[in-house]
Image: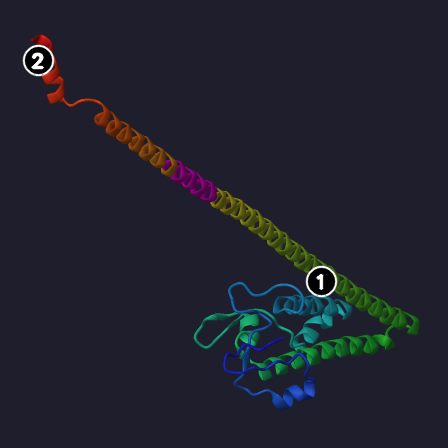
């Protein structure tokens, strides 16, 4: 569990209680039992809400083992009150926020130690009350009460262990489902990436192929144009050559006119 302090890097997971007493400074605050939002405190195992529920269940159940006329007296001696309190300004203060929200870590440790002491004190008072009633009851009856007390406490303990295991199982399942969903999203993203890459590759292939075909067609047209121009030049040259031959063989207009005049005479 990391303590909330931006200016310090402190981790208490591997510290023993004695080391914690020696190393924690009062100014280091924490809210790991509640979370960062006191309006909606963290829920589940190892949270302040679970601790409050367990304390209240223990407090209410342990008094059932005492004599009815002594329950009020024993309850007054048990300091396990988790009700809301009124401060000097008349404002209502929640038990969780008062004890665990942005409170120095050393103070939280002291509070938890006191709660542990009060739980043992409650057990001691109830057992003492049972022993004080031994003179009124037979030893068998006392032994039966002690056995019944042990059975009920063991039953409560097993019930809590089952609840914790069930919550832990649900939490693990949530983590597994979340991981599976994350893997599925990642696989889907990879699949889409592959499809996009393939589509892009195909598009690039057709663009390159189109450019190659266009260049090839332009080259063929240029070659055909050059061939046509050569043929055209050859034809024109032939025509000009033939015309020169004709001009050299045929008489000119003056000679034809003289020949016509001679024939008319």
What is the x, y in percent for residue 120? 74, 78
What is the x, y in percent for residue 205? 52, 45
* SS at mark 2 in the image: helix
Q: Earlier in the sequence, mark 1 or mark 2?
A: 1
Question: What segment carries the magenta color?
Answer: 210-225
Q: Looking at the image, which is closer to me, 24 or 41?
A: 24
Where 204 falls versus 51 (above or below)? above
| Label number found at residue 168 | 1
Q: Is residue 80 left or right of residue 230?
A: right
Q: Looking at the image, which is closer to me, 84 or 38?
A: 38
| Residue 216 is a magenta residue | yes
Residue highlighted by disc 2: 261
| Label number found at residue 42 | none
Q: Is residue 234 left or right of residue 188?
A: left
Gap between marks 1 and 2, in whole Å? 135 Å
Q: Residue drawn 62% across and 56% down?
A: 182
Q: Specify the principal SS of the magenta part.
A: helix
Where 3 falls versus 36 (above or below)? below
- In front: label 1 or label 2: 2
Q: Is residue 216 left or right of residue 116?
A: left
| Residue 61 is a magenta residue | no
What is the x, y in percent for residue 61? 73, 66
What is the x, y in percent for residue 124? 77, 79
Quadrant of the image for the C terminus? top left
Where 232 falls versus 150 (above or below)? above
Q: Quadrant of residue 1?
A: bottom right
């Amino acid at each position: 569990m990391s303590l909330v302090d931006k200016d310090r890097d402190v981790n208490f997971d591997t510290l023993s209680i004695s080391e914690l007493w020696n190393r924690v400074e009062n100014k280091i605050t924490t809210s790991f039992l509640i979370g960062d939002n006191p309006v909606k405190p963290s829920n589940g195992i190892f949270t302040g809400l679970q601790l409050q529920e367990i304390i209240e269940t223990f407090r209410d159940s342990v008094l059932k083992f005492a004599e009815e006329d002594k329950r009020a007296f024993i309850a007054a001696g048990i300091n396990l009150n988790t009700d809301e309190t009124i401060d000097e300004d008349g404002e209502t203060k929640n038990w969780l926020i008062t004890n665990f929200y942005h409170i120095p870590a050393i103070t939280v440790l002291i509070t938890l130690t006191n709660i542990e002491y009060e739980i043992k004190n409650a057990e001691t008072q109830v057992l003492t009350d049972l022993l004080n009633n031994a003179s009124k009851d037979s030893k068998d009856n006392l032994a039966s009460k002690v056995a019944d007390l042990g059975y009920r406490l063991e039953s409560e303990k097993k019930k809590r262990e089952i609840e914790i295991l069930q919550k832990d199982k649900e939490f693990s399942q949530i983590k597994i489902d979340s991981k599976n969903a994350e893997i599925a999203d990642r696989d889907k993203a990879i699949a889409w990436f592959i499809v996009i890459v393939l589509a892009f590759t195909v598009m690039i292939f057709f663009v390159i192929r189109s450019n190659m075909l266009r260049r090839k067609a332009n080259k063929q047209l240029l070659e055909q144009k050059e061939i046509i121009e050569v043929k055209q030049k050859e034809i024109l040259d032939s025509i000009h050559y033939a015309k020169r031959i004709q001009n050299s063989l045929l008489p000119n207009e003056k000679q034809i006119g003289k020949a016509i005049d001679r024939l008319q005479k």
